[in-house]
Image (tube, rainbow, N blue to C red):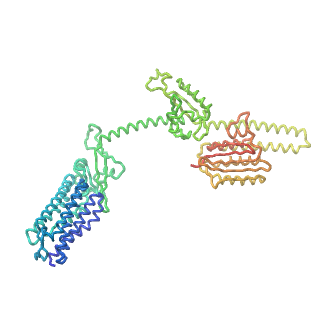
């Protein structure tokens, strides 16, 4: 093998290996159809080149069959080339079933003509040649030139749409055009082989494809990606590499941003820092002064651009194409609308602030007594979301029919054009608890009617403003109860002391010891009473936020304390492993009062049962004794929280339980049958 043959083998081998080695790079292209066409073009061209190498190297009996394989592979490169060109230029020819079937028929027909050449000899003939080295010289027939002409025409169509794409892109595609022109350079070698013996008559097309592949996949990949876009002259487009360097831009981009002139190779952050901030940030609108010292017809001279980025990938690098669309008119309208909304929001906030500082909740009702609006604060007050009340009658928040009658009486006053108010108006929460509010009602008139001309017939609704009065009412009741109970009980007990003291004065002998003991018992009751009053005072704080507390350890600790103080009491406990409620540690004081009361007033001997139950809504602790039962007036204290001059308890212990539990968002109830059961319920943890 002489030097000339080595050159041919080396050139075609390098061409084939380059094409095959470029396939992984082409597979990284992020557009499926373009990637598919390019990969198959490289694969068929690489195989074609290597078959040409084999043609030079195999022994004589295998050369002609090897050449036939190369002819089939060479014609096979036409179809992925056309597929690639159609996909790259955003056309759909490669997706049309009819064209794909036609291409398959043409390929199979031509391939059959080629492989059957040994039978008909019309495609080529082979003879031994010695210049420039010994090889099998091919003399092509008419069929070869016809097929070759068809292949060149089809390839030229693809070449044309590529060059057209480059021209329309608006980018500097000179290097790409030169690379693409290399695809046609082998044609000159093919023609030269017909006129000089120093060029072998083989097809040189693989060399052009190899050069094209190296260029577009490695040297000019950025421009190749940018030129592929289907939006061209009219759009401002900047192409950036992975490091944010400007690789190219459209003419429209330079017209919009004159700073881009001669900026290829510079970083976008250096040339256009404001644009770079938008590209790398979350904001998608770029505000830019157009450079004139005048206001335009629609605004202040500032132009607004919508900035979008699209990523394109090659191998392990990702580049970005940044597009700018002038949205000045729409953006000015949006900003004007936003300013109006902001001004309205400010006015709304002022109104809301006035309402919030004056009332806890604001409602609106129609003439039929149905809610049409509820302020968001109603949820914290009554437990209802505003939407749950709107459309429902006012009576849904009333604890009983008497309250509804009271409300309708007040509503009729408002519908006559008067304002009205109610103090300590009872309301039922969603959870069923009764709270109290100071309520003010005022008529809402048709806004189109002047103030001076308004009559009750012009009323279209009722405005209700409520302030939570529950805490104030509880404080007032607390003060009243303490004063009343202390005044009444202390007076009676002091009467007893005074009476027995008189008896002792008259009877210095006999039952003196018994009477002295009775005096001591009375004194102890007064001490207990004063201690209970003190504990109520200590637990008056109603504003502390609740926290999660496990009842089981508290119950266990209190039961141990009860057994120590009252050894004769039989105590049983039924509780789960955990019972967590939303409460505060002071609930322990209320539970001890119940246990202590059960031990003191139980049977002989006393028996106390403690049961702890947990539901999704609450945690309940029930304390049961076997005594005679709590008197009716004492149960009234627990269940209603009211004490009047005629209905009062003998001490403050049950009042202490009531106030502690209710200030922790809980409730207490008592039942009496064979003994007494007092149940404390507190909200379960969320």
Where's residue 150, x and y in %?
15, 60
Name above or below for residue 125 compared with residue 378.
Answer: below
Where's residue 656, x and y in %?
69, 43
Name above or below for residue 265 compared with residue 351.
Answer: below
Toward which corner of the image does residue 60 lie, by quadrant?
Answer: bottom left
Where's residue 608, x and y in %?
74, 50
Where's residue 35, x and y in %?
27, 60
Furthest toward the front, the residue is: 119
**Residue drawn at 64 percent across, 54 percent down:** 576
Name above or below for residue 637 compared with residue 453.
Answer: below
Q: In the rendered view, does 673 fall on the left or right side of 339?
A: right
**Residue drawn at 25 percent across, 42 percent down:** 292
Q: In the rendered view, does 333 fall on the left or right side of 505?
A: left
| Residue 227 visible here | no
| Residue 327 visible here | yes
Q: In the rendered view, does 220 fall on the left or right side of 591?
A: left
| Of the pair 42 and 213, the residue shown nearer to us | 42
Furthest toward the top, the residue is: 453
Furthest toward the right, the residue is: 509
Placement of the N terminus among the 4 image quadrants: bottom left
């Amino acid at each position: 093998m002489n030097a000339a043959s080595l050159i041919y083998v080396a050139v075609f081998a390098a061409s084939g290996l380059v094409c095959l080695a470029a396939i992984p790079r082409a597979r990284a292209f992020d557009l499926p159809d373009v990637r598919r066409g390019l990969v198959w073009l490289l694969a068929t061209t690489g195989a074609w080149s290597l078959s040409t190498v084999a043609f030079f190297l195999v022994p004589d009996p295998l050369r002609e069959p090897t050449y036939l394989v190369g002819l089939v592979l060479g014609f096979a490169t036409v179809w992925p080339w056309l597929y690639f060109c159609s996909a790259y230029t955003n056309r759909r020819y490669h997706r049309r079933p009819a064209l794909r079937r036609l291409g398959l028929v043409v390929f199979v027909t031509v391939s059959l003509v080629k492989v059957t050449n040994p039978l008909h000899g019309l495609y080529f003939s082979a003879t031994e040649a010695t210049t420039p080295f010994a090889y099998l010289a091919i003399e092509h027939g008419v069929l070869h030139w016809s097929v070759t002409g068809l292949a060149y025409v089809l390839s030229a169509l693809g070449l044309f749409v590529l060059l057209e794409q480059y021209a329309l892109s608006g980018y500097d595609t000179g290097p790409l055009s030169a690379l693409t022109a290399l695809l046609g350079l082998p044609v000159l070698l093919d023609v030269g082989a017909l006129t000089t013996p120093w060029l072998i008559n083989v097809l040189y097309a693989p060399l052009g494809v190899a050069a094209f592949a190296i260029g577009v996949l490695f040297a000019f990949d950025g421009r190749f990606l940018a030129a592929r876009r289907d939006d061209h002259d009219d759009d401002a487009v900047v192409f950036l590499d992975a490091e944010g360097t400007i690789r190219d831009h459209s003419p429209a981009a330079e017209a919009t941003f004159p700073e881009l002139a001669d900026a290829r190779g510079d970083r976008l952050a250096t040339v256009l820092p404001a644009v770079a901030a938008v590209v790398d940030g979350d904001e998608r609108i770029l505000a830019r002064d157009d450079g004139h010292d005048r206001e335009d017809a629609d605004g202040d001279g500032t132009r607004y651009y919508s900035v979008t980025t699209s990523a394109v990938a090659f191998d392990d690098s990702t580049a970005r194409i940044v597009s700018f669309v002038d949205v000045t008119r729409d953006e000015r309208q949006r900003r004007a609308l936003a300013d109006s909304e902001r001004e309205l929001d400010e006015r709304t906030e002022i109104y809301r602030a006035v309402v919030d500082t004056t009332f806890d909740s604001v409602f609106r009702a129609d003439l039929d007594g149905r809610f049409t609006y509820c302020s968001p604060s109603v949820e914290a007050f009554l437990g209802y979301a505003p939407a749950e009340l709107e459309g429902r009658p006012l009576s849904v928040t009333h604890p009983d029919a008497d309250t509804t009658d009271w409300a309708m009486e007040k509503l009729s006053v408002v519908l006559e054009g008067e304002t009205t108010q109610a103090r300590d108006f009872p309301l039922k929460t969603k959870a069923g608890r009764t709270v109290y509010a100071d309520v003010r009602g005022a008529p809402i008139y048709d806004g189109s009617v002047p103030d001076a001309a308004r009559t009750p017939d012009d009323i279209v609704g009722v405005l209700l403003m409520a302030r939570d009065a529950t805490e104030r009412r509880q404080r007032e009741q607390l003060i009243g109860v303490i004063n009343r109970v202390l005044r009444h009980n202390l007076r009676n007990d002091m009467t007893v002391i005074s009476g027995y003291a008189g008896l002792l004065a008259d009877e210095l002998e006999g039952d003196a010891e018994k009477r002295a003991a009775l005096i001591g018992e009375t004194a102890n009751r007064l001490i207990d009473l004063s201690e209970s009053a003190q504990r109520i005072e200590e637990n008056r704080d109603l504003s502390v936020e609740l926290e999660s507390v496990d009842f089981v350890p508290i119950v266990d600790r209190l039961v141990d304390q009860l057994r120590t103080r009252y050894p004769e009491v039989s105590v049983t406990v039924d509780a789960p492993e955990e019972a967590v409620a939303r409460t505060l540690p002071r609930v322990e004081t209320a539970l001890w009062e119940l246990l202590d009361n059960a031990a003191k007033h139980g049977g002989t001997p006393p028996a106390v049962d403690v049961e702890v139950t947990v539901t999704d809504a609450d945690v309940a602790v029930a304390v049961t004794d076997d005594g005679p039962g709590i008197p009716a007036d004492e149960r009234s204290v627990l269940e209603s929280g009211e004490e009047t001059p005629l209905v009062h308890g003998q001490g403050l212990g049950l009042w202490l339980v009531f106030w502690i539990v209710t200030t922790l968002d809980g409730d207490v109830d008592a039942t009496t049958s064979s003994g007494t059961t007092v149940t404390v319920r507190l909200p379960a943890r969320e």
